[in-house]
Image (cartoon, rainbow, N blue to C red):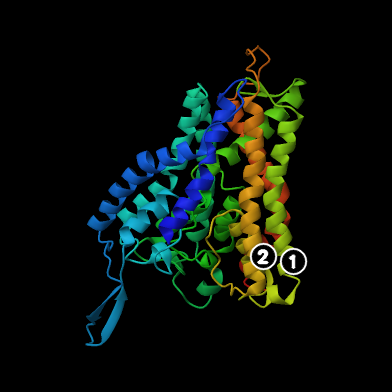
């Protein structure tokens, strides 16, 4: 099941090469052959890496067997049936293909999926591996390797900010639990595996939501409000911080187009990216893609918290219940798959989440492919002294600022109703 879904995601994300060709080609009439890319990616990238990853997981104790279960005697003498299966091979494609669907219900918190700190680190590395590598691939294909490093640097900066906030939040104990007499020195360990601790859990939560993965080794709903806000905001931004296999890169390029457009407005000249002029059509398609996700995330959340079928599925009320609903639609539209675990799905949620998933996938990739086609047909202009460089620290700062400003203006009101007000209430020693 996980393998099939992982390949589905790869098929969707293979459009990344078409998008890159759109920026790399000049006066072209096409942006590549999708099926050729599918075969190459499967045979030459996914398969060999997954074989190595699966063998490593087996070495570390992850089961790889065709047995469905095994019955054993416990220390107390009782009989217990333990689920087994080809877990190692599923874990490999689950992480490398940023699918995230766990073999067991508790996903990477299960000891058969993620036995120790080393496998935890390798799984995070696998989540980021292809998404991060595509930045260099982009630079090489457009003939400007420094451009790829500039994109990588901007993504890395946002990743470090998110990781720092998540760890800082979770390193603090829950003041309400501390008031009951619990030892605050361990930080907030609720919902976390002791073999990973706060660092491994906060880092995993940030990585899996920076990419469109959704695998979890801890319960995001058990994070403190600001710690839980980091995974939520990562998905809201479109999972562009390294991101899914291809989807992160083309999501980032949308913000790069906005950044150079703003730079062009500030200096009074036609914006350019990689020597190609950014015109009205590209900006319209960019805004269509960028606005699609918040429309689905916020629109369905607003509906869910005012109708009975939506409210009846929430396990909490007040700001935390609102965050449950917001996270569900954000994860669905962002094609992430992780969840604030308290939501009980019913017909209303199944239907609306399904619509959100479809819109989040296709209503973004279609305008992105339109941009790629338009860019491929353009000629490359010779750089002039007035050309805005997009491979320097100034561009990194500009595009990072654009991402944070656009994300803040779009989602801050919703975040203020959920995790932010919950954080303030928790500091006051009360909950709504």
* Residue 302 in view (yes/no): yes
Relative placement, left or right, of 92 versus 394 is left
At 52% from the left edge and 61% from the top edge, which residue is drawn?
338
Give the mark, 2 or 1, whose residue is nearer the N terminus: 1
* Residue 158 in view (yes/no): no
Labels 2 and 1 touching (C-beta < 8 A): yes
Q: Could you say whether the residue bearing mark 1 is in a helix, strand or loop?
A: helix
Relative placement, left or right, of 265 versus 347 is right
Residue 185, position as x, y percentages in the image:
43, 65
Residue 128, position as x, y percentages in the image:
44, 45
The answer to whether residue 268 is above or below residue 311 is above
Q: For marks 2 and 1, give the CA distance.
A: 10 Å
**Which label belongs to residue 303?**
1
**Which label belongs to residue 16?**
none
Q: Nearer the viewer, mark 2 or mark 1?
A: 2
Residue placed under numbered mark 2 in the picture: 352
At 46% from the left edge and 36% from the top edge, which residue is drawn?
36
At 54% from the left edge and 58% from the top edge, which residue is drawn?
227
Quarter that holds the C terminus: bottom right
The answer to whether residue 208 is above or below residue 217 is above
The answer to whether residue 132 is above or below residue 346 is above
Q: How many marks?
A: 2
* Quarter of the image where one finds residue 69: bottom left
For the residue pair 69 and 419, the one nearer the viewer reads as: 69
């Amino acid at each position: 099941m996980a393998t099939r879904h992982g390949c589905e995601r790869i098929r969707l994300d293979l459009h990344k090469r078409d998008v890159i060709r759109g920026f790399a080609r000049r006066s072209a009439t096409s942006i590549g052959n999708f099926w050729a890319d599918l075969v190459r990616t499967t045979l030459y990238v996914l398969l060999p890496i997954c074989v190595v990853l699966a063998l490593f997981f087996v070495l570390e104790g992850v089961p790889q067997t065709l047995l469905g279960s095994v019955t054993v005697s416990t220390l107390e003498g009782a009989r217990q049936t333990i689920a087994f299966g080809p877990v190692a091979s599923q874990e490999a494609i689950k992480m490398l293909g940023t699918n995230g669907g766990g073999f067991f219900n508790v996903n990477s918190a299960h000891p058969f999926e993620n036995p120790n700190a080393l496998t935890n680190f390798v799984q995070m590395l696998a989540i980021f591996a292809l998404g991060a590598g595509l930045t260099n691939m982009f630079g090489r294909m457009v003939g400007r390797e420094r451009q790829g490093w500039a994109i990588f640097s901007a993504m890395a900066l946002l990743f470090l900010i998110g990781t720092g906030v998540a760890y800082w939040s979770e390193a603090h104990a829950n003041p309400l639990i501390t008031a009951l007499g619990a030892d605050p020195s361990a930080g907030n360990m609720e919902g976390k595996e002791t073999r990973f601790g706060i660092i491994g859990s906060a880092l995993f939560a940030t990585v899996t939501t920076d990419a469109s993965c959704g695998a979890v080794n801890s319960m995001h709903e058990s994070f403190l409000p600001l710690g839980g806000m980091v995974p939520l905001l990562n998905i809201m931004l479109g999972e562009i911080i390294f991101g899914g296999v291809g989807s992160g890169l083309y999501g980032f390029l949308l913000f790069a187009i906005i950044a150079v457009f703003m730079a062009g407005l500030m200096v009074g000249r036609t914006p350019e990216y990689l020597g190609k002029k950014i015109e009205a059509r590209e900006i319209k398609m960019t805004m269509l893609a960028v606005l699609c996700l918040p429309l689905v995330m916020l629109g369905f959340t607003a509906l869910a918290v005012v109708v009975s079928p939506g409210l009846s599925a929430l396990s909490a009320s007040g700001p935390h219940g609102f965050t449950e609903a917001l996270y569900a639609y954000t994860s669905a539209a962002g094609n992430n798959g992780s969840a604030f675990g308290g939501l009980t799905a019913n017909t209303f949620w199944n239907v609306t989440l399904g619509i959100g998933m479809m819109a989040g996938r296709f209503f973004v990739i279609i305008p992105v492919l339109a941009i790629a086609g338009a860019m491929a047909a353009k000629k490359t202009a010779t750089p002039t002294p007035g050309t805005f460089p997009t491979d320097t620290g100034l561009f990194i700062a500009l595009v990072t600022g654009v991402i944070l400003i656009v994300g803040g203006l779009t989602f801050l009101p919703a975040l203020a109703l959920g995790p932010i007000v919950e954080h303030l209430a928790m500091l006051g020693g009360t909950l709504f």
